[in-house]
Image (spheres, rainbow, N blue to C red):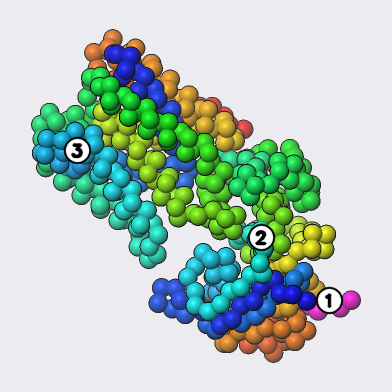
Amino acid sequence: MTWASVTLSVAVAVAAGLVGCFAVMRRMSLASDAMSHVALPGIGLALVLHLNPLLGGLAALLAGAVLVWGLERQTGISTETVIGVVFSLALALGSMLATGEELVEALLGAPGAPGPWELALGLAGVAAIVAFVLTQRSRLVLALVSRDIARTAGIAVGRLELLYMLAFVLTVALGLRYLGVLLMGSLVIIPAATAKHVARNLHAMFAVAVGVAVASTLLAEVVAPVLHRPTGPVIITLAAAAFLGSLLVRRR
Amino acid sequence: MANALEVRDLSVRLGGRDVLRDVTFDVAERTALAVIGPNGAGKTVLFGALIGALPYRGEVRWAPGTRIGYVPQKLDLERDLPVSGRDFLLAKVEVSGARRDEAIRALDLVNLPPAVADQPIGTFSGGQFQRLLLAAALVGRPTVLLFDEPTAGVDEPGQERLYEMIERLQEAEGLTLLLISHELSVVYRHATNVLCLSRASPCFGPPEDILTPERIAQVYGEPLKYHHHHG
């Protein structure tokens, strides 16, 4: 545990909590999990080419976001089916490109501290994501309730949705180092799903989602070394425990 | 009287099928146009083209400075969506650059108690939700209101109150109204003009010309019971 890695993972938890709120409300829980798999072939390709694997993952995610966005705009195609096929393919290709230890690290994350550049870029990315969600939340809410209401209110709905997808995949990319392709989607979805269950308005949802994501991250930093386990899976286990606990809370 | 909207030869093709073909009509300012027709005749598609959500051929000309308030057809929302009525209204306030007190004014105009507005929107009754959508449409001082079946999912007495409210608002705010409706007796009473869409060619005119038993039978493909309310 270093201050750099704790700082970055807490910042990423904040971004994940906020971005996750709209992912869960837009009913893209499963799609977004599948989508984070698209990072794998990017990581694999970067390893083959001796480039930074995280940048490879980010590039593949950005391409995936544009692809999903484009598919959603097409009528007559079952988006869910295409996402299912494309992202299973991504997982398969990625597993062939990366092998052994590298593959396990790409899938589940690896211990280790971020370098100064990674920390700086990561924090800048988090700042951009948080600023996007907080400044665009009204537009996102209107588009969520009805695209037609949003459109007549002067919102460029297509562009807004593309920006949201980019914010989403950037969030996933930021967590790849310590959570991996398989678990990062869960840090976005589970805290927000917990918040959706207990909150009755938007501010409460933001607060609970960020709270669960940050608390799971911090607690995992303490618990994981004691259990001699990597931090990533412990974070997700704690977040999932919070979600299960929230089911016991009666909402009304 | 100036026109709020002029539509010429509007055609919309979706999935290889002509949903609308050569629809032409005008809507004068501060009047009400009712759009009628059987299911699948393209009523909602027409609205989609008018607001620029769907590609079309032909001309759609809104008067300069038109601001549209849109009340969509019954929305499929999850009951546990953590968005309160107030969140939704304030989102509309922020996006349309209105003042915050416009949200309170809008709630007042549609008689929605503030205590109800604080609930999650998924828990609203049909009538409450329609009034919330109407309130949101009124935020930002629209010049035109578009209603897609305002009374779907609203009980009978609620429907009458909703139409009365719409008419009162139209008067008070000087609005132009476009509404899709299945309630022909309501259309007869409230509409200035009627546009009927059907597989046959579209027809357009004042209700007393359009809502004749023969015409209705032609549009809906079968005689439809409805009552004239004179006076």
Q: What type is the residue that disc 3 sits on? A: Ile
**Residue A40 visible to an observer of this rendering:** no
- Mark 2 on the same chain as mark 1: yes
* Chain where mark 3 sits: A
On screen, residue B203 above or below A172: below
The answer to the question of whether label 2 and label 1 lie on touching residues, with beta carbons closer than 8 A, is no
The answer to the question of whether label 3 and label 2 lie on touching residues, with beta carbons closer than 8 A, is no
* Chain where mark 1 sits: B
* SS at badge 3: helix
Q: Residues within 10 Å of mark 3 (few under 14, many from 20)?
A: many
Please give the residue where the numbered disc 3 appears in the rendered image. Answer: A43
Q: What residue is shown at x 68% (from left), y 38% (from top)? A: B118
Q: Is residue A185 left or right of residue B151?
A: left
Please give the residue where the numbered disc 1 appears in the rendered image. Answer: B229
Q: What type is the residue that disc 2 sits on? A: Arg
Horizontal and vertical percent position of residue A76: 37, 66
> What is the C-alpha distance between the residues marked 3 and 2?
48 Å
The single residue placed furthest to the right in the displayed view is: B231
